[in-house]
């Protein structure tokens, strides 16, 4: 995905959107209609790519998904820009050329041939902690190590929820966000990918679900992205029409306070920067 210059018109967009083709609640067309009614200039679909090791959340009908988004592109042409994206897991890359963009995310640990989901539920995450004997520093090193290697080698168009490992950290005693050793690991790792050229999403999804008070990445990591002049975009990780732009105003204010001047959105098939 290429980059162009400044976009003067205020754009409203969300490129991290899940429909009923995976674990979302709304159909693609319901999402498009809602986006138009909310004044969106564009909407990007990012169904969870097929993962053969875990069929609970991923798309089982990728062809149907692709055909439906293409149909909607044509039907609503002139009303809203629609993009065919996909959220691939770092452990299971897709055929990239079939999509307008890819979001690269890491939802699993792979240990001894088994895949452990880190974000599906607090109980599943507790199992991850048990596998690591609650050694959260080692857990973070393994999680970010694999994810950062993937980012630098794959260079996805968008990096999804960089520190997803902290999704449930505010639900009890904090093991990560208040842990200085963890924060040093996370900061070192985001430094290693900040110059990758990827767009990093500022993801409000866990806030809308009641798990977190702040977006991913955590604010200390956003300061590092700012220091490297990395590109960011707003993403709600929406799973229903009600959350397409959840928390965007608050996230924009936070980014401005950190020192960001622009966010990036897709327009006419290119990433363009919009003034905050």
Image (spheres, rainbow, N blue to C red):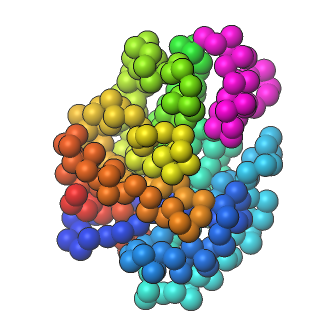
Image location of residue 226, percent across then percent down: 25, 38
Image location of residue 192, percent across then percent down: 39, 27
Check the image and report above or below for 163 versus 73: above
Image location of residue 276, percent across then percent down: 22, 58
Image location of residue 123, percent across then percent down: 72, 30
Check the image and report above or below for 48 versus 188: below
Q: Residue at x 67, y 19 (%)?
A: 129
Q: Quadrant of residue 267?
A: bottom left
Q: Which residues are magenta?
A: 108-135
Check the image and report above or below for 212 versus 13: above
Tell which of 268 and 116 is nearer to you. 116
Q: Is residue 155 visible?
A: no
Please state if 62 lies on the left or on the right of 191 as rendered: right
Q: Is residue 255 visible?
A: yes
Quick check: is 275 in the magenta stretch?
Answer: no
Q: Residue at x 44, y 58 (%)?
A: 246
Check the image and report above or below for 172 versus 5: above
Q: Quadrant of residue 128?
A: top right
Q: Residue at x 42, y 75 (%)?
A: 38
Q: Quadrant of residue 193?
A: top left
């Amino acid at each position: 995905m290429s980059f162009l210059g400044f976009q003067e018109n205020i754009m409203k967009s969300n490129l991290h959107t899940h429909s009923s083709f995976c674990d979302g609640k709304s159909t693609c067309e319901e999402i498009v209609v809602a986006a138009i009614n909310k004044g969106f200039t564009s909407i990007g679909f990012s169904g969870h790519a097929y993962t053969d090791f875990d069929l609970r959340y991923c798309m089982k009908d990728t062809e149907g998904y692709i055909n439906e988004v293409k149909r909607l592109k044509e039907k609503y042409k002139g009303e809203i820009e629609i993009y065919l994206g996909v959220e691939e897991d770092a452990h299971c890359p897709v055929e990239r050329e079939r999509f307008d963009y890819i979001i690269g995310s890491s939802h699993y640990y792979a240990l001894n041939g088994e895949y452990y989901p880190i974000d599906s539920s607090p109980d599943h995450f507790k199992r991850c902690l048990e596998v690591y004997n609650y050694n959260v520093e080692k857990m973070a090193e393994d999680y970010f190590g694999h994810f950062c290697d993937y980012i630098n080698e794959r260079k996805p168009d968008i990096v999804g929820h960089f520190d997803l490992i902290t999704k449930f950290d505010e639900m009890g005693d904090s093991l990560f966000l208040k842990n200085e050793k963890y924060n040093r690991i996370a900061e070192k790792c985001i430094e290693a990918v900040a110059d990758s050229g990827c767009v990093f999403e500022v993801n409000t999804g866990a806030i809308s679900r009641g798990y977190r008070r702040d977006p991913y990445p955590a604010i200390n990591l956003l300061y590092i992205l700012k220091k490297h002049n990395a590109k960011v975009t707003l993403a709600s990780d929406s799973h229903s029409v009600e959350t397409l732009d959840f928390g965007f105003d608050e996230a924009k204010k936070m980014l401005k306070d950190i020192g960001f001047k622009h966010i990036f959105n897709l327009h006419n098939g290119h990433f363009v920067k919009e003034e905050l």
